[in-house]
Amino acid sequence: MAASSSSAANNHLHEKYDVFLSFRGEDTRNTFTSHLHAALCRKKIKTYIDDNLERGDEIAPALMEAITKSNLSVIIFSENYAFSTWCLGELVHILRCKEEYGQCVIPIFYSIDPSHVRNQQGTYGAAFSQLEERFQDNIDKVHKWREALTKAANLSGFDNLNKTWTEAYLVDKVVEDILTKLSETLSDDLKGLVGIESRINDIKWLLCNHSLDVLTVGIWGMGGIGKTTLADAVFNRLSRKFEASCFLANMRKESEKHEPNHLRNKLLRKILNDDKLNIDTPSIGSELVKRRLLNTKVLIVLDDVNDSGQLELLVGDQVQFGPGSRIIITTRDRRILKEKVDKIYEVKGLTREEALQLFHLKAFKNNSPGTDYAELLGMVVDYAEGMPLALKILGSSFLHCKSKEDWEAELNKLKKFPSQKIHNVLRLSYDGLEENEKEIFLDIACFYRGSNINFVKRMSDSRGLFAAGIEVLVDMSLIKISSRNCLEMHDLVQEMGRSIVREQCIEEPGKRNRLCIAEDAYHVLKNNTGTAKVQGISFNTLEARELDMSPSAFEKMYNLRVLQICDTKYIYDDKYCKLYLSQGLEFLPSTLSLLRWDGYPLKSLPSKFSPENLVELRMPYSKVEQLWTKEQNLGNLKVIDLSYSTHLTELPDLSKSQNLESMNLYGCTSLVLIPSVFRYLGKLTYLNLGSCWSLNISPGNIEFLSLVGSAMEELPLSFGSNESSPCLILSLSKKLKKCASSNCQLKFSCGGFCPMISSSLGNFSKIPNNITVLDMTGTTIEVFPSSIERFFGLTKLELKDCQRLVSLPTSICKLKSLERLDLSGCSKFEHFPEILEPMGCLTFLGLEGTAIRGLPSSIGCLISLIKIELENCKRLASLPTSICKLKSIYRLSLNGCLEFEYFPEILEPIEHLKYLSLERTAVKKLPLSIGSLVGLETLYLGHCKNLEFVPNGIYNLNCLKYLSFDGCLKLQKLPPFSVGLCSLVELNLSYCSILDITGSIFCLASLRSLYLCGTMIDSIPASIKQALQLRHLYLINCSRIHSLPELPILSCLHAHGCISLKTISRICEEFKFSNCPNLSQNSWSNLMDDTLIRIMRMATATSNFIEEEDSNYGEEGCSVIIVCPGNEIPNWFSYQNEGCSLNIKLPPNWFGTDFLGFALSLVVTFDNYNIEKLRFGCKSIFKTNNGESHEFNCRVSGSDWDGGNYNFHSDHAFVWYNALELVEGAKCSATLYNVTEASVHFYQQDHSGRPVNYSSLMVKKCGICLLYTRVAEKIIVGEDTISKRRRDEPEAWGSDIFSSFEDQKDELLPQITRKRKNGGADF
């Protein structure tokens, strides 16, 4: 209802409301309205309702304020609503708030026909007959009421005229809709939480709020990375959508303080709203409690869980919650989540830009750093490596620094004495480890960070540790495994580990068990202070001073197991050396398992050294001539690396090194002989003899052999003859002419550089039998012999581009180990052989570009096939139904198969097929059983010019994310929409023959991108505004569209060539209305005014419109792009000029902390210009008051028009926000604080960024506007007065954007205050 008396309204003046209820009291006060109000209160939604029964003719001013202060208004139209002028007055003010402030409005038609409200018929007609008679002296007021009713009745709402819903159900649906709209409208208090918005959206996506399943999502990451902060933000945003919610914070500490049942009782009491509930037993025995939980839709956050027992007790199998419930668990230990959750989200660190922003916020507050601080800022931010906790703590530490010297002192202190607060948080993860994992962690932190995981496992095994502990460290977020299989660790985590070692003895490094700081190692080696405590030394000599070591430097360290002396500079300059042994070296501990010494300066290792425990010996660039002279027990040795040891003449007796796996002798130019004993080293699989110029070889069971740079012409007969191990020749000598016997076991690459194998079939018999890889790419082979089955160990057969190859023998099915068969580009290959028996290992089959006409029905025997490529098989007409038997198939592409007409019926469900492309095929219809592809995520049907029919079964593809009918010229309609496609993200209907779009398509809850380019549709249904997830709308060349309805919040709208378009409802961040000639001047002016507000909202980060994964602007540096016909720079641009250049004098302190960036504008004249990509560059020269100048060259825009050529034949206006890439760089380098003048020149660029000059386009005008926080806030909340000022005084506005606000300060403040409370306007 409307209304309340002024006294009732005054009671709430100081509050802000979520919802305002407008209703006719005598109709619904004690029925529907009371139920709705009670339901909203139960959801903790602050609702304004009038409980006063007295009415007047005029709405009270105080009540108008209450409406203004509400975020959303609900209008309950009932039979007698229009008889109340009070209600009608409320309605007019509500709609004014909608137009001015973007307030959400939901109409409910309670037992009344919406058309009666819209057209003032029925009781509404009777009411207006009375009103027109009553207000005949003020008939304009009656007209406003009529207009308001018509507008309100056209809004999306709820109609219960036919009583299709019970009142209870209607109340639930209304409350659900209100919650959704409020969550989108109200911005959370995320101040200071840099970069969190995109992470919130990631979690929301994982939670799948539309699903009725009970889902559990784990938030996992290292300490201090922001798990709790993220969970808290998600909880605050979503909790009101649930019947009950509970956030159990800091469960690690709570579990230490209380009994386990304490947390469960706390959870149950909160969820069931029962403070007296107490359960002391291990299980919940009460059936009533269980039933109440099962009937409650809950949101639960369990924060900082460190024990799986906690989860079992709180949310285990015995505790079941209602449909749609969501549970979020934050933890450092992924092991806890693996069996308990549906999805795991790993929290990543902040980007460098986000980190700079957060640190700036904490260290400087509202002050500006000086120019000299840029490098120091970068050093601190790099040190934190994206960890929010570290950035906050460090920011507070630097807050008290008043000068650059203070900063440098604080930074030096930090390097020597790291922040204890940060370490305390990180150490919780270390303290939770078992002893085995603690030792491995400290080894990685001190010695092995960045090392290959297999190497670390090897070294852990040599210590008697269990290498499985590495996986535990990964799960505890202490280390990561890179894509190259190397162990990575955050700098602060490494520092924490090293500080644990340092605490063993602060004063004397020689009494610690690990030395990994060059300064500490230098101290111990120089002063001979090492003790039996020392187990490892690792340092880079680049970080140490020069030292002439004592011959007995290691004598007291008889427990030393790791010695790594790295010298990366020595690799490039063999005259460089910081570590001397002028008196030789007498002792190395026999406990050593790893010895690495780059550039070792002596001719041999100490004679007393007993390497019985040595696992790896790495001495590249050494001066050794021979390692040792006597026989040694080397039973544990697995790796030798003596590469580039140019003085090495011979190798020692390695007959007892039966575990040796790898030897690198590359560049040992003096090495003459590889001893015959090598053939008996059964585990040696890697041997690099590259650039060993005069070498005799007799190796045995090698898997990798490099002979590049050697002069070898022939491999010995004995090479590879041991059948226990295959051999891989990767790199052969160019002079190699003869292979070993046909019995040698080789993985073979027939490179064209090697004369041993030609591309002719004549030499095929020379290939050894037991090869595992056969690569004959590009050879002239025509037919494979049936004897191919003799290659029984073959795993890969590469026959790409064998353009004479016609067929394969059926005996290929005998290759039971074959994993990959690639025939791509074999343009004469016509017949794929029958598969006479199952091939259990084949996972990839490449037939792209072959001449096959079909596949045999026996294709189903390829039972493990994951991927089959059939693209551009231009003669392929069909596939056998047995394709359905390929249960593991993941990807099937028939793109470009021009004669392919019929996709087979799917006889049984296929779960693993994720990707199916039928683009550019001749298919006329999809099979009725298409819905049986139950796991399909991508279906491309683009340019299927004969496609006419799509079955209803397509709606059964509930995993489908991407669906494209682009260019299907004969497709006129989709089947009637039914429930389904619940995961669809992108739908492309461009250039189809579809004439209209049904509104039901916007019920697709996940739809984010919709392409309708080139269609003949003339309108878009108003229900598009219900597509709340829609972010991209493409309407290019939709020549019949004349207007656009109210749209949801979009990231980009492309509408080039919509020649009939006249009006639109709102703009978005990327807006292209090029070649839309019917847009009026008034429309253009309004769009440009709105663009200013959009830019300011974006610049101040008050808008949540663009999600990180949807943004197309990262590469271009743009947040807002506007393109439309026009020949004027918007008048709010402070600096404008004719042509492509302008010079400006910058105001004092222009580059302060509230500087947001630049808005740029160009007017470009086109003369029948065809465009695919349009790019402008910008050369900017900034001059300081002392004569210095700084030049920046950057791209202003790299916009494309979706891959086609689009004709421009008139002037167009372009507006960009934050397009200059110099802004980010300048803030980091801090070079612009003293700049007073700037000159800017715009120019055209080609695709590579080079300046060009096209005669068919020219920059006619240019403009720049500097953006500031103080101005942006006023624009956002005061746009109504500002727009009026712009219309009335354009010259004053254009010349001085700053003074125009200062002059109106007193006038604007009340409006600013009011609109700030409402979040500004919604455009």
Image (tube, rainbow, N blue to C red):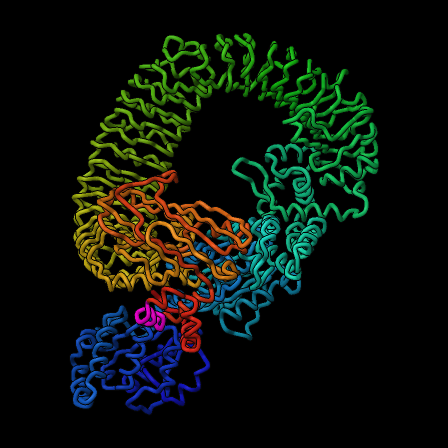
Horizontal relation, residue 315 to residue 933: left or right: right
Tell me which segment is drawn in magenta: 1280-1290
- The x and y percentages for residue 724 are 55, 18
- The x and y percentages for residue 1294 are 36, 64
Horizontal relation, residue 1042 to residue 461: left or right: left
The residue at 70%/53% (across/down) is 409
- Is residue 1306 shown in magenta? no
Q: Quadrant of the N terminus?
A: bottom left
Residue 1086 in the image: above or below residue 519: below
Which residue is nearer to you in this view: 970 or 938? 970
Horizontal relation, residue 1160 to residue 469: left or right: left
- The x and y percentages for residue 403 are 66, 58
Asked if residue 313 shows in the view, the reply is no
Residue 993 in the image: above or below residue 607: below
The residue at 17%/47% (across/down) is 993
- The x and y percentages for residue 1063 are 23, 62
Residue 348 in the image: above or below residue 631: below
In the rendered image, which quarter is residue 519 located in? top right
